[in-house]
Amino acid sequence: MAVRNYILVCGGTACESSRSKEILKALQDEAVKQGVADDIQIVQTGCFGFCEQGPIVKVLPEDSFYVKVQPSDAAELIAEHVIKGREVKRLLYDKDKASKHAQVEDIKFYQKQFRIVLRNCGFIDPENINEYIARDGYSGLERALFEMTPEDIINELKTAGLRGRGGAGFPTWMKWNFSRNVESDIKYVVCNADEGDPGAYMDRSTLEGDPHSILEAMTICGKCIGAHQGFIYIRAEYPLAIRRLEIAMKQSRELGLLGKDILGSGFDFDIEIRLGAGAFVCGEETALLQSIMGHRGMPVPRPPFPAVKGLWEKPTVINNVETWANIPVIMHKGGEWFSKIGDADSHGTKVFALTGKICNSGLVEVPMGTTLREIVFDIGGGIANGKKFKAVQTGGPSGGVITSENLDTPIDFGSLIKIGSMMGSGGMIVMDEDDCMVDVAKFYLNFTVDESCGKCMPCRIGGKTMLAILDKITAGNGTMKDMDLLTEIGETMRKSALCALGQTSPNPIISTMRFFRDEYLAHIVDKRCPAGKCKKLVTYTIDPDKCKGCTACARRCPVEAISGSIKQPHKIDTTKCIKCGTCVKVCKFGAISVH
Amino acid sequence: MAKMTLEELRKLRAQKQDDLQKRDIAGKDCQIIVGMGTCGIAAGAKVVLDAFLKELDDEKIENVAVTQTGCMGLCYVEPTIEVVVPGMPDTIYGKVDADVARKIVKEHIVGKKLVTDHIYDRPSVDIMKNGGR
């Protein structure tokens, strides 16, 4: 019996946390109960990327895109859609555009995207190697093993122009070539899956949705440089990604795609998983390698670079998950094909985790050279709640802000550095008029100070000192001299810290001082926080003309700072007020203002 | 599963590609829409649907998506189906059974010729705003 409907259920971490597992189970149970189990196939896939609307269920061939599905909806989906062929309108993303014609293509979120890295996410079952193989999986490896010399592989990468997606953008072919040219009996291949930027989850989704692409890529690299052992360093906080990788590795070994004599070519390669304990600094390559070897995760000075002397002093190629995910496609379709995607500066695509004050948060993959405006307003749907766009932070705690005047800058490695930010690993946090830029800078610095390993002085002491100054400014005690001091310490850290964590941690401060100097001045000179975020600089007051005396705020105030009798204007006791903002949220008359 | 050689991997890929192809809507330019309202199902639409799926599978036709819809309003000639093929008028067939389904695949989809005995028009096209669509 031919299958007539395919139901794809998102199995990414985001959707799984909103019960997609139960949905899968409920759909399977209902299919049996309603007697259509043989007519349909229910598949658990990787992340669809549209996490804002999760959990997501897609039904083919109608291409119906169901969002925010609950386990209790399963019975209706089977009864209505599968049996009667009527789409369940209330669950569709675009309720007006129901039926007949492909829906996914109409969703703006997907229109400007181009998927290489996420090519299989949300389409195949990541726990089934056959589906990966059917999507041209392991054909890149076939070419690498049987048709290409190591030199050919390097040249293919060179033609493609692939640059490292972990943030720095170093040409991948160069890195591989360094390792290839070192004479050594033992070499290693490492996958950096220690994703740690706040708000970033591109790598997690790739591993969860398409684990085989990483295994295939690492094996190709092993063949190219002459390595027989690979390591995937992944943080223990990614249990689902780890499980999928383990399943994928087991299946690959069974089919002879990993292990001894791969596909009868005589080439041996195997991979081990190493779990990280979640230290941000272990995403830095030298610290990561230390951690794999069982040492404390601290960076060591470069050179020598890992490509020459890495794990156990042996040549080691270390690439980030997203970089790896591009390799099988390049080997299969050719570097020429890849080099045509993107702009002159950077080829290929980039995956971003779009979060913050945005309508459609989620995973986005766009060709290099797409402008920020297209990402934020076309794909992301603009700012939530009709607020005004203020800035985007790219590159996480190592990057900087991009303001509205630079919205039309093409996103590629070169252009972002020119405007004082960086590509980073792909976190993209959108901020609106309610965000205080001094507070944002403080948030990131707080993070890097927490995560500093303490080995080198500039990072250990510089970070702490800068944080103390920001604390002072946000408390209303800043002076103009502090601005100069921040710049001076920042510049020193940039020049002298041991690793990228320390060198880049002043970036958010330097960049916000450059673009939002007036906000810093407001805090320092006027002792005022324009966005009303810095608690020590704001007071809450009730406008007696607008207050109707409904008592809603008084009842909700956790410290009983609001007094007044029914139908009479209320008052806030500022000595008791802890500035939690609860009263503003519950007031229906907009009577409470923050200054 | 045993370890594979290169040839076995290629064979496995070719075989699984067919399975996955059915899931891919890109490249499917033709559509068969089966009316699966209560009237349609009672008249045997499910048999027709299965017949289409089987025939397309047997003939290895891959550019056709078979979808379902509700009642088309032609309850007197159920089961009804609509066939959409580029370059041909969208056609509604009524009184379709498994044999007619096979005929539609052979003549309409493959042969690009209408199957004359079973064509019906949309109801009340003239009085509906957008031609009944």
Image: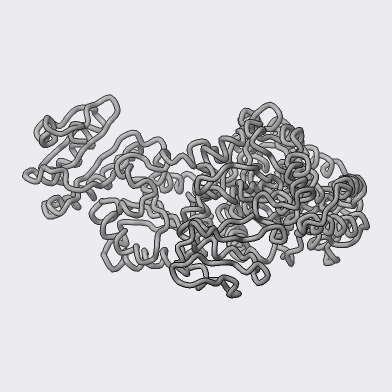
Counting from the top left corner in percent of width and height, residue A227 is at 78, 51
In this view of the protein, which residue sits in the foreground, A518 or A364? Answer: A518
Residue B26 located left or right of residue A387: left
Q: Is residue A496 above or below residue A366?
A: below
| Residue A162 appears in view | yes
Residue A90 located left or right of residue A568: left
Work out which quarter of the rendered image holds the C terminus of chain A and state it. bottom right
Work out which quarter of the rendered image holds the N terminus of chain A and state it. bottom left
Counting from the top left corner in percent of width and height, residue B13 is at 50, 46
Counting from the top left corner in percent of width and height, residue A131 is at 49, 51
In this view of the protein, which residue sits in the foreground, B41 or A477? Answer: A477
| Residue A260 appears in view | no
Q: Residue at x 49, y 42 (%)?
A: A109
Quarter location, residue A150:
top right
Residue A566 located left or right of residue B7: left
Q: Residue at x 35, y 68 (%)?
A: A29
Quarter location, residue A207:
bottom right
Q: How many numbered discs, if any? A: 0
Q: How is the image coloured?
A: one colour
Counting from the top left corner in percent of width and height, residue A80 is at 26, 56
Q: Residue at x 28, y 45 (%)?
A: B67
In this view of the protein, which residue sits in the foreground, A223 or B67? Answer: B67
The residue sitting at the top extreme is B87
